[in-house]
Amino acid sequence: MTLRLLAFTDRGFTLAQTLAEALDGEAARCGAPLGLAEWTAGGFSQADALVFVGAAGIAVRAIAPHVRHKAADPAVVVVDEAGRFAVPILSGHLGGANDLARKIAAQCGAVPVITTATDVRGLFAVDEWAKRQNCRAENPEAIVRFSSKVLAGETAGIYSPWPIAGRRPEHTAPAAERYCDAMLTIRRESGDALRLIPAIAVLGVGCRKGTPAAALERAFAEFLERSGLNSLAFHKVCSIDLKRDEPGLLAFCQSRGLAFETFSAQALLAVEGDFSPSGFVRSVTGVDNVCERAAVLGSGGELIVKKQAGDGVTMAAALAPFSPDWRWRDE
């Protein structure tokens, strides 16, 4: 998590530095050198969490122009300069502001001022659970419907093709895919249920030298269409070392926020499995298949979509092991 802290006074800056050291963040003093507006704008585009050490009103006015959606906004917490209160003011669950406020409180002896309804009543927060399970909400507007049932004392059904370990929270129950209120899935689905996508898929890619990012985007769109996979399930792209500095591939990964990892031909050859061999690929790279082997090696899991080829691009997908549990808050 990229954490940035901003203080408005010398006393506040001392606290910000202490918290930054404890929480692996970066502390700054307002105006040295960035002003409030510039610092906030940069934080919203580049950081996962922002902490304002000072008055809540200043923080609210600073972030107001940048607030977009709970699924995209960073966590924002305000701490008074005396370190007495830690107040999450944005992205309490999906962004992790509630958890961050608790961590800050533990460091400086503050009171975490948590106001989200499920937390106040000690009830299951599906969006906080999703974050802890490394899931992305495809339709976050459905969080309200799910949470409303829990808050009303009704039972919300959850579908998962993976076993969920631990004790199931109150007001939740297993449900069939057709009748659930929330589902864990890596596939493209429709309907009103909250769709939580585990970020566990790895995209293996091979391409001709000089392949532009636009061609990779087209290939990926076709790959998703054929496979039925949800793009939100992908968190990394893997290939061979020969493609480490390929401009189009780097641009494709950057535009989608995907990590990029490459492997040597020797490492790829050592991967066990049933792969689609190509004599031409072997003659160029030293390994009979790049995309399938890279996907499996990068995921540590199993190949789920074999090589698809077109326009000088090959793609395959593998799935990392996934073992969800019912943890949704610190016990």
Image (cartoon, grey):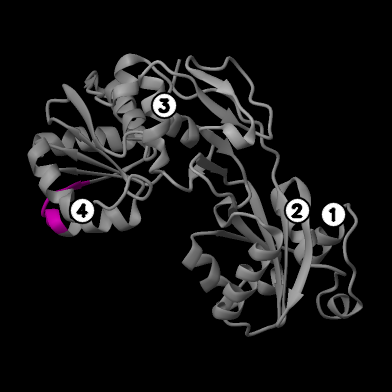
- Residue ID at (39%, 18%): 123
User: Which range of residues does the magenta coloring cover?
Assistant: 28-37
Q: Is residue 141 above or below residue 207?
A: above
Q: Is residue 181 above or below residue 254?
A: above
Q: Amino acid at mark 2?
A: Leu
- Specify the label residue 14 is tagged with: none
**Tag in front: 3 or 2:** 3
Q: What separation in Å lies between label 3 and label 2 (alpha carbons)?
A: 35 Å
- Specify the label residue 40 is tagged with: 4
Q: Are marks 2 and 4 in contact (CB under 8 Å)?
A: no
Element class at badge 4: helix
- Specify the label residue 271 is tagged with: 1
**Looking at the image, which is closer to me, 274 or 11?**
274
Q: Are marks 1 and 2 in contact (CB under 8 Å)?
A: yes
Q: Give yes or no for residue 34 being in the magenta stretch.
A: yes
- Specify the label residue 297 is tagged with: 2
- Specify the label residue 125 is tagged with: 3
